[in-house]
Amino acid sequence: MKSALSALARRTEEPPISWLMHVALAHPKLISLAAGFTDNPSLPVREVRELAREIFSSDKTGRPALQYGTTLGDPKLREATAQHLRRLDGAAAGNKTYSTNRVIITSGSQQLLYMTTEALCDTGDIVLVEDPTYFVYLGIAQSHGLRARGVRLEQDGLDLAHLESILESLQRSGELRRVKLLYLVSYFQNPTGITTSFAKKIGALKLLKKYERAAGHPIYLVEDAAYRELCFSTEMNGRDALPRVQADRQVGPTNGRMPGGDEKSALAARGFEDRVIYTGTYSKPFATGVRVGFGVLPEPVFTAVERIKGNHDFGTANLLQQILARAIVSGRYDRHGAVLRKRYAHKARAMRAALEKHFPPEVKWDLPGGGLYFWARLPSGMKSGVKSKVFRAALANDVLYVPGILCYADDPTRRKPDNEMRISFGSASEKNIREGIKRLGKVLKRFV
Amino acid sequence: MKSALSALARRTEEPPISWLMHVALAHPKLISLAAGFTDNPSLPVREVRELAREIFSSDKTGRPALQYGTTLGDPKLREATAQHLRRLDGAAAGNKTYSTNRVIITSGSQQLLYMTTEALCDTGDIVLVEDPTYFVYLGIAQSHGLRARGVRLEQDGLDLAHLESILESLQRSGELRRVKLLYLVSYFQNPTGITTSFAKKIGALKLLKKYERAAGHPIYLVEDAAYRELCFSTEMNGRDALPRVQADRQVGPTNGRMPGGDEKSALAARGFEDRVIYTGTYSKPFATGVRVGFGVLPEPVFTAVERIKGNHDFGTANLLQQILARAIVSGRYDRHGAVLRKRYAHKARAMRAALEKHFPPEVKWDLPGGGLYFWARLPSGMKSGVKSKVFRAALANDVLYVPGILCYADDPTRRKPDNEMRISFGSASEKNIREGIKRLGKVLKRFV
């Protein structure tokens, strides 16, 4: 007898992160520089204690936090989110792009990425992604039977010439009608740390628009801004901003200024409001256990996602939303964000120092201006994948990284690079960052 | 230019509940007996205040609540859930059906229903549902392009003869291979309040098994036990248990005993452990704003759902899980459940009294032994749908119910009954229950 599983279930693979977590559990002394977890000591325990005390001090505020809400989310949190984004983009108060009724609250931005993909993509459709990109998004795409094309990255984000050549080639092959979206992790990208400049976002939107006629339908820019608020440079007022070095992938000058957290989002691109799907999260800049994401969506995607969410869960837990709404309105959210940015800047500096000390010069790495990751490239031909000597030696020395190859889509037009690694300073302590990089450096020196 | 929406998005309709909520908002004086919201005054404000104070009294317990967890859920909550279900079913301590590693924690049981459907059903597949059934599940099925067959209900649940005739007819038409599951709201069903007896669950499992050979794959029983713990009869020790009356749909004697919350779940059916998918929720018996559901699943569905959840959100918010785990372990969950059951029993009695006083005798209704709903049937030919005179007159008199027709699947083999109504005592106050039923009774008397 066959299994009763659906085509979707049969396609859906074990996420690489699960495998890495099993590996970590099997090695109790392991230092994991692989996890996407956030910094533990800076989690806002005191703040949430205060927020909970306030919310549950009376039935008037306590009961709404314990009752069902609406599918779209708490009205106050939706409004605060619209204002928050408007402020981040420096937009005028009346700007309708940032109106509350375009905002939806979700269970992390991950859920919004899932629902957006459900709303737009049929099996066999093509998604354009950065090359490399966020591997859990690749999981969503793979599960839905989507094909992918990887757009190369430059120091300031998407390689627009490559994007255009992909669109052209898809037009020639008659496949442009299968292209529904370009997925862009726009700030301190997971995994590379690269930020796409506002100018390039506009460039990408123009290119997508240009090819819409041949596609026969809109092609959306899905901007995943998950790391936007984990920005070091702004926090440090440029004084001690981490400069990018060793930029061997750099293809041209960037006017002496790296794009950073102060780049505007694609929402600010005039005339493209109906083509931008923006996803963000309150989890990473506040507390990942208070899992709340949000999005700004144009019609008809907004209505489709609202209905789909009605079927998923008819609304994210109200308790989480009330905590966040109160954290934002009381100023605690912003204050904690400032603390967190300093903290991550500190940890990033610790990792940089360790990399400089322990990594062989043949291994190149970029300094991120925010986010949680360093991205390192081994010499060409020196593999870093899960079956490589480097990975196995790292494991034998109790240190774990994310093999870069896991972050590349199955794009038949190029071979996946297999000589990179994502190294996270998010959850490891400074001591473990130093020790982990030391161990990893030792391994790399052996094989260089 | 066409829209870029997927086939799923184009299929997905506005949920009826959204429309009803818009109606409610447009009528500020309206008494809604339609909402599936739970009782507001009994929400556990004090309990959650205490739980939050305990959790956030130290970094040791506070930080894990604010950090990411795992896709499957908090290990302690998974274990507590396994024990909770084992206890409810009166199973032995070592019974492997209730082992922790078969449990997954989700964002409400709704999310599990969604993911289970994704894991098992392809477009065009057939789901067997109760006739009538939970309308949000019909939304999931409709969104995924599934077809449905409605299985008639008797006083003690599924009409097994009808189930068999459906399976037979599908076998004859060669469509049995498209049947993946039977969806059963097993306790105090939404909308009818009917509980399916344990004997009938076994009967249904045997029938599904019998037709598996012809189907070529397992056919699962998805038991949605969302209302299991909202049981009056157990709470009241039979003393003042609400008897069922006016059972004009009753087809035979039930040995003088109505099935109730003490019926065993399908998990307890020996030899069928690998065919039962059990979904439950902590939201309704505790707090709907702390949205946590759970499931017990057999392989290979368990692994498929775990992977799918990895793509949805890679784990339900840890804060919610920690609150519930602590509520269960501390006994607060059980104590609150007892309070809640008394409260709903009280409200159900208030509604019964109002129905007896105000409804015309031609309108038949059953007394539920738990849950949140009464189900009433108007005389044949007297319509209750959204375009009916009754519905419009009710609205004009500021009272809202759920038209029964919304709870029937699009089953081409029968016409949808259009003379029923779901009336909820969940969220309305006793005063509004009395006044709402009075208004509705006045309307009904006019048209009878």
Image (cartoon, coloured by chain):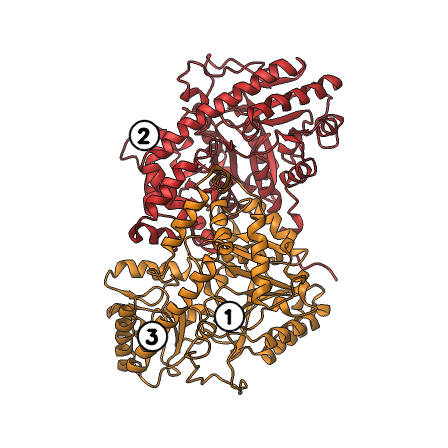
Chain colours: A red, B orange
In the foreground, B312 or B393: B312
Q: Quadrant of residue B42?
A: bottom left
Secondary structure category for the residue under label 1 = loop
The residue at the point 62 percent across, 58 percent down is B297
Dot 3 or dot 1, earlier in sequence? 1
Q: Report the Cα–Cα distance between label 2 and label 1.
A: 52 Å
Q: Quadrant of residue B370?
A: bottom left
Q: Report the Cα–Cα distance between label 3 and label 2.
A: 53 Å
Which numbered dot is residue B187? 1
Mark 3: amino acid: Met
- Residue behind mark 2: A91
Q: Chain of mark 1?
A: B
Which numbered dot is residue A102? none
Secondary structure category for the residue under label 3 = helix
Q: Position of residue A160 (x, y in %)?
A: 52, 25
Which numbered dot is residue B351? 3
Q: Position of residue B424 (x, y in %)?
A: 37, 69
Q: Is residue B19 above or below residue B247?
A: above
Q: Is residue A393 above or below residue B248?
A: above
Mark 1: amino acid: Tyr
Q: Position of residue A123 (x, y in %)?
A: 60, 47
Q: Report the Cα–Cα distance between label 3 and label 1.
A: 20 Å
Q: Position of residue B146 (x, y in %)?
A: 56, 61
> Mark 2 or mark 1: which is in front?
1
User: Few, some or many C-alpha atoms within 10 Å of disc 2 (few <14, some 14-19, many ≥20)?
Assistant: some
Q: Is residue A96 left or right of residue A41?
A: left
> Which of the image's four quarters has the N terminus of chain B?
top left
